[in-house]
C-alpha cells in the first residue's frame, strides 16, 4: 500500500469503538484521536522482542485490526493517517526529531498534520502526550487534554513543548514538510537494531482510559494507573505479563516479546 491507500474504515472505526457519524470537523477529529488512544496501545513489544516491524500500511493495518495489537509511532500514526484520509480528511505525514533526552536533529518520529479550517497537529503514537488536536499556527499555550502545550518556532523547525510548572519541556521538533512512509524506513531500522535504543531495552504498553486523561501503563516490573491525577502502582512479574496484557490491553503476544524471568 502507499501513503494514499484507502483502508477498511468501517473495520477500523469498530476497532477503536467509534460509533458516531463522521464529519470533517475538529470535534470529530478529536473524538477519533481520543478513541484511538483509548483502544489501541502505544507499545513496543515487537521491537523489544526483536521480531521485526515495518513502516508500511500492509504491515501496520493488519497488525492493528487483525492481530488487535498496538505499536509505535511508525505503525500507529501511519495507520491512523490512512484512516483519516479514507474518511476524507487532508493529512500529511511529518518527520520529527524527539527531544526528550536532549538535543537531536535526526528524524526518529512520525506525526500527523491534519488540515481543517486551519492546520492541526495530531498524534496517537507518542505515549503520555497531548490527546486532542493542537492548532499549528497558534503560538499561545494550548490545552492538550492532558496538560498545556505550546509551539516554539526556530530556524531548525517547530518545537512542540509541554509546560510543567510554566516551564516548557521540549517533546519533539519538526518541519511541516510532507513525507512518504518510506522516508521513515531508516529511522525504524536504526531504532530496532540499536542495542542502546530505549525501544529495545524497556518493554512497555500504555493507553488512555475512557478517552483520557486517565491512563494505564505497563512497564517491565510494574503497572501504573493514573486516575484523576492520583497514581497507583502495583508490582508485575514476568509471569504476570500475559494476564495483565489481556486484562488492561486486550492483547495476546508471543512470549518472546515479553520480559523473561
Image (cartoon, grey):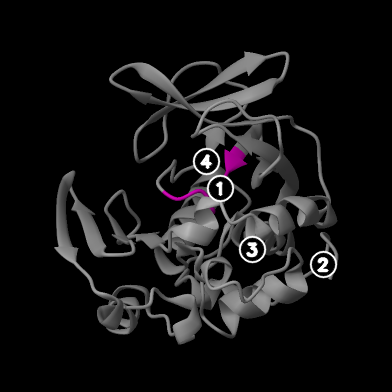
Q: Secondary structure at mark 2?
A: loop
Please report whichever mark, 4 or 3, sits nearer to the chain's N-terminal start.
Answer: 3
Residue under label 1: 123
Q: Which residues are magenta?
A: 121-127
Distance from the alpha carbon under mark 1 to that under mark 3: 12 Å
- 224 to 101, vertically: above or below: below
Distance from the alpha carbon under mark 2 to that under mark 1: 19 Å
Residue under label 2: 5
Q: Is residue 165 left or right of residue 258?
A: left
Q: Are marks 2 and 4 in contact (CB under 8 Å)?
A: no
SS majority, magenta? loop
Q: Dot 4, how many residues are within 10 Å of its Cα: few (below 14), some (14-19), or many (20+)?
A: many
Residue under label 4: 133
Q: Where is residue 144 shown, x and y percent of the image?
A: 42, 36
The residue depicted at 53 percent of the width and 34 percent of the height is 134
Please report whichever mark, 2 or 1, sits nearer to the chain's N-terminal start.
Answer: 2
Distance from the alpha carbon under mark 1 to that under mark 4: 8 Å
Quadrant in the picture for the N terminus: bottom right
Q: Where is residue 124 shown, x and y percent of the image?
A: 53, 53
Q: Is residue 85 left or right of residue 142?
A: right
Q: Is residue 147 left or right of residue 42?
A: left
Q: Dot 1, how many residues are within 10 Å of its Cα: few (below 14), some (14-19), or many (20+)?
A: many
Q: Where is residue 73 shown, x and y percent of the image?
A: 60, 55
Amino acid at each position: 500500500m502507499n501513503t494514499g491507500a484507502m483502508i477498511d474504515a468501517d473495520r477500523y472505526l469498530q476497532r477503536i469503538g467509534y460509533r458516531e457519524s463522521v464529519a470533517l470537523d475538529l470535534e470529530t477529529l478529536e473524538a477519533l484521536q481520543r478513541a484511538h488512544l483509548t483502544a489501541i496501545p502505544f507499545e513496543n513489544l515487537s521491537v523489544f522482542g526483536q521480531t521485526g516491524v515495518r513502516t508500511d500500511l500492509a504491515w501496520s493495518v493488519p497488525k492493528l485490526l487483525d492481530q488487535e495489537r498496538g505499536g509505535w509511532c511508525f505503525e500507529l500514526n501511519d495507520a491512523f493517517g490512512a484512516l483519516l484520509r479514507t474518511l476524507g480528511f487532508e493529512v500529511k505525514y511529518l518527520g520529527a526529531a524527539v527531544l526528550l533526552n536532549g538535543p537531536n536533529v535526526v528524524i526518529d518520529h512520525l506525526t500527523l498534520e491534519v488540515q481543517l479550517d486551519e492546520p492541526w497537529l495530531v498524534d496517537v503514537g507518542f505515549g503520555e502526550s497531548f490527546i486532542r488536536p493542537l492548532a499549528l499556527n497558534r503560538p499561545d499555550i494550548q490545552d492538550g487534554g492532558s496538560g498545556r502545550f505550546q509551539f516554539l518556532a526556530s530556524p531548525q523547525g517547530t518545537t512542540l513543548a509541554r509546560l510543567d510548572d510554566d516551564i516548557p519541556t521540549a517533546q519533539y521538533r519538526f518541519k511541516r514538510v510532507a513525507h512518504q512512509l518510506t522516508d521513515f524506513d531508516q529511522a525504524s531500522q536504526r531504532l530496532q537494531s540499536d542495542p542502546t535504543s530505549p525501544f529495545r531495552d524497556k518493554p512497555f504498553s500504555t493507553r488512555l482510559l475512557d478517552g483520557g486523561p486517565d491512563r494505564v501503563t505497563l512497564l517491565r516490573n510494574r503497572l501504573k494507573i493514573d486516575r484523576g491525577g492520583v497514581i497507583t502502582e502495583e508490582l508485575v512479574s514476568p509471569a504476570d505479563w500475559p494476564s495483565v496484557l489481556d486484562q488492561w490491553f486486550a492483547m495476546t503476544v508471543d512470549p518472546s516479546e515479553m520480559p523473561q524471568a
